Amino acid sequence: MKRTIIILLFLLPWTANALEIPAGGEFDQRIKFIAYNPAEVVGIMGHYGFSTHIEFAPGEKIVKIGIGDRKAWDISEQNNHLFLKPIAKQPITNMTVLTNYRVYNFELNAHASKRGAHPEPNDMCFQVKFEYPASAARAAERVAEKEKLRDMLNQNDESQPKNFNYWTKGSKTLSPNKAYDDKRFTYLTFANNKEMPAIYIENPDGTESLVNSHVEGDVIILHKVAEKFVLRKGLLVACVYNRSYDEDGVTNERGTTIPGVKRQIKGEI
């Protein structure tokens, strides 16, 4: 009975306040991992004569460290890395770490290892790495949303009428393999081995203006429909004529021909 009471008293400091204890890794139990939770206190068991390395998220930078008994622990930091080593006989204390992104709370304790670097049970922490499942899930959701939107923007909407009545004249080197429009955008497809030209429209006064466009694969997508486009590269010139040009074409207010979607992607994945 006495033995049972002694064991329970020994465990009490780590269990009474529901500390979160880092779990040992698959390859070496001394490399430990723990999921970040701002509402939890993480227990770190140090060992005299050994240091513990705590690693926060990449991009985080330690701004301030507050500790209950600074004389009990040797502490140093570098960017998102924190190094701890117990030095006092009474090591138990608390520590708060502020980074540029998060707040971390710890309870620190320590004891001497009877088996050097391989204690039993193996509560030694050479390294503690924080993991961020909530942040990873949010990032994955953002990536999925952007990819879905890109797919919607890049797909050809079969419900939109297509006009394929295009003719070309001039340099065959510059002429597209295929041309069509959907009454909002004009699509010029080029062979993979062709260099893509600059594309202009003719103004009423006879001058030319460069057409706003973007490239997707081997297709130049012109952000308008016109009766005639002029393709230039060096001294080479070709013209693309829309034989079914409709001056009353649909105004493109959403930046896309996909129903229900407005083109507005901020940043890249």
Image: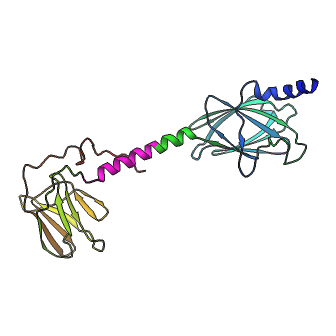
Q: Is residue 255 left or right of residue 111?
A: left
Residue farthest to the front, as pictured: 1
Q: Which residue sits at x=71%, y=27%?
A: 18
> In what quadrant of the picture does the N terminus appear?
top right
Q: Nearer the viewer, residue 260 or 197?
A: 260
Q: Nearer the viewer, residue 79 or 215?
A: 215
Q: Which residue sits at x=21%, y=76%?
A: 173
Q: Nearer the viewer, residue 249 or 148?
A: 148
| 38 lies above or below 222 | above
Q: Which residue sits at x=13%, y=68%?
A: 239
Q: Nearer the viewer, residue 36 or 151?
A: 151
Residue 223 appears at what percent x and percent y? Answer: 21, 54
| 77 lies above or below 17 | below
Q: Is residue 166 left or right of residue 95?
A: left
Residue 150 appears at what percent x and percent y? Answer: 34, 50
Residue 151 painted magenta? yes
Residue 133 picture quarter: top right
Residue 215 appears at what percent x and percent y? Answer: 29, 60
Residue 259 picture quarter: top left
Residue 155 painted magenta? yes
Q: Which residue sits at x=49%, y=40%?
A: 138
Name the magenta segment's main secondary structure.
Answer: helix
Q: Total of numbered circles in the picture?
A: 0
Where are the magenta residues, as a range?
A: 141-156
